[in-house]
Amino acid sequence: MVTPLSMMSPWKSGGLSRGLMACGVLACSLMASLAAVAAPTPGARTLGDTVLAAIASNDPDIRAVAVDRLRYGLTGDWFTRAAGERLPSLPPAVQAAVLSALGDRGDAAAVPAATSLLGSSSDAHARAAALLAIGRLGGAADVAVLVKSLAADDPERAAARRGLVILGGTDSPAAIRAAAKAATGVSRSVLIDALATRRDRAALTDMVAAATDADALVRQAGVRAVAVLGGPGEVDGLARGLLQSQPGGSRVEIENAVVAICTVNPGHEQATETFLGVFKAAGEADRETLLPALGRIGGPAALAIVDGMIADPTTRKQGFAALTRWPDAAVKDGLLDLLRTSTDEGEKKLLLAALIRIAPLPNNKLNDGQKLDLLKKTMSLCERSEDKATVLERANAIRTIETFRFVVPYLDDPTLAEPACRSIVELAHHQKLRDAHKDEFIRALDKVLGTTKNDELVDRANRYKAGQTWDRNKKS
Amino acid sequence: MPFDTTTLDAPFAALKSFDWGGDAAPFKTIDDAVVAAHADATLRADLEKRFAALLGTGTSRAAKEYVCRKLSLIGTAASVPALAALLGDKDNSHMARFALERIDGPEPVDALRKALGEVGSDLKVGMIASLASRRDAASVPLFAALLTSDPMVATAAAQALGRIASPAAAAALAAARPKGPAADAVIDARLACADAFLAAGDRPAAKAIFEAIAAAVATAPHTHRERAIRMAAQSGLFAAVDDTVAP
């Protein structure tokens, strides 16, 4: 049976003051600050009893009001503890509501009750609420409880994950880092994700190590984390990881992280310098592994390296391969020159692919007119129908009426009509462009309808002609 | 340098027949004069006189609206009679109130209170709202008497009493027994009074109202509104007795 608050002595409801008495010198200083907190008045204690009774009642409206009072009122750990003591006797749904209110209340005195409920309740939602409350109110000492719950199913696992992200206290980051180091498998990957969400840069060394872990989940989490938080200091480690990785999935993941650090993250210029240094120092075999990342990072210094490779017959093809991945149109003139002068069909194919990819890229440093000009020049250098078809399909990424007018004539070319139809329909998808040139679009869409045998294109063309839209996700 | 008032003659002449959508450019001079009048009592008096003259007959509604807006910025007791004369005019009453609500001193409030007893139901609601915006304690008995009048006026009176939220207003609301929509407005206004008392630190007064409302609402409420009132009253009651937090 629970003693009513109104019948307790001012400090009877909590063991904090008694515990502190036994802690010698520390207790003296803490007691001094506690003395500043006034003991609850008899009126507050009576109200506390009323509120707790209302929380335990079967009246959902009054219970909601009472839970709100717990959330925002009746301040003091005496009431936090009293509410915590009542938790076991409440139905699970009410336990969850009370724990949420205790979390909002922000009083760490609720942590023991939340932890105790975890040990006694079998209701997943109540347990999840307890974990969230621990996350909001707890500290380093509660990391173990949260980590243990990562092995549970949702909603507990999700709550534990969130708890690890929001856990406060100056010692908590170190405790989470230690837990991440000690954990394996899913738990380790979740802990690394949590550290990344917490933007814990002190964990970067461990994250880089995780990025080359044998466990795919851990490796992916490490790469994700480094891609978000990494800077120049992580480039060396990641480059080593890249060199140790097997071609395919993991190599691409690590490469993505390297590219993000060298192009997006703070300090990316310095990170690029570091990566180029690693590249220059690498042997020929290692350079081949690092080359795709180098191409994706781009920039004048990387271009100088690639130009050198192209000038050397033994590394010429690798240089071309790097250019096909270039992030912007800075290499367009070089590519066009090489394409005009090259006599090797394999080289020409690579160079064309690079130009076709680069020309309409959204952030390639060209305006729409320049993008279209480059695409037109590329088209003029295409000899094979499949290359021309790719140019037409890439064209729709440049959403202008000039692009539309460039594509329309190809509707009359039997070998290129189908890709032209796809591009016209894609351009017509953009209502502002379509409505601003309605007559032209309707004529072109009529031509599409008379040309294509693709049911989806027919449906889309008819919709755009009628001023309707088309849901890309539903694909009617 | 004092404002050259001779530059105002032409724009004021143009203002008389101004209509919405017309060329408002000439009134820039008047706008400038209104700004200058904040630091020039003579100019202010001159402008008030000119504006008052435009509030009579023979001036377009658009011009009167313009004048009321300007008087809301620089009007004094001297402008009150001309504005008060518009309070019974259904086309211009609201703009006259707009100006009167913003003019300092007891004169505008007296004029609004006087008009309250003279205008019809539609305009009465406006007078009540304007007096409530001035938190006019002297209007409380007038509003109390209107709590049993037609629903529109009674509702406005209840809302006004909730806004004034004085002990007298709370007492008038507690004594009221209106029916229909005004009954809901009275409960809302009583909750508003209790909240105001609580915010002002008068816990006993707030508690008394919350208790009375909580007691009056059925234990098993039937409608969403009844549930909301019951919860509001209970929440207020908890807040009124919770001395661990500031009201």
Image (cartoon, coloured by chain):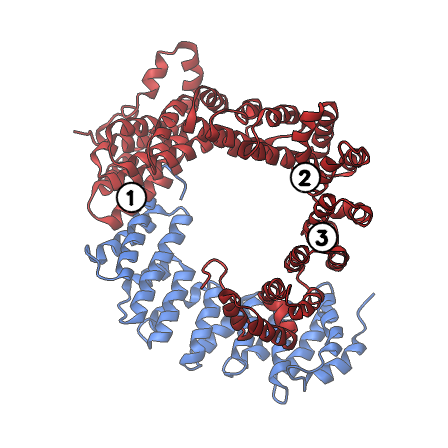
Chain colours: A red, B blue
Name the amino acid, label 2.
Answer: Arg
Give the alpha-carbon distance from disc 1 to disc 2, as whole Å.
Answer: 59 Å
Percent x, y of residue A242: 61, 28
Image side of residue A46 versus residue A154, left or right: left
Is tag 2's residue or tag 3's residue first in the polypeptide sequence?
Answer: 2
Name the amino acid, label 3.
Answer: Ala
Q: Residues within 10 Å of mark 2 (few under 14, many from 20)?
A: many
**Location of mark 2 (residue):** A296
Name the secondary structure under disc 1: helix
Occupied quadrant, residue B11:
bottom right
**Location of mark 3 (residue):** A359
Percent x, y of residue A167: 45, 30
Q: Are marks 2 and 3 on the same chain?
A: yes
Up the image or down, A141 lies above or below B119; here it is above
**Location of mark 1 (residue):** A66
**Chain ID at mark 3:** A
Image side of residue B163 versus residue B145, left or right: right
Residue at 65% over, 84% down: B19
Give the alpha-carbon distance from disc 1 to disc 3, as whole Å.
Answer: 63 Å
Q: Residues within 10 Å of mark 1 (few under 14, many from 20)?
A: many
Name the amino acid, label 1.
Answer: Ala
Give the alpha-carbon distance from disc 2 to disc 3, as whole Å.
Answer: 15 Å
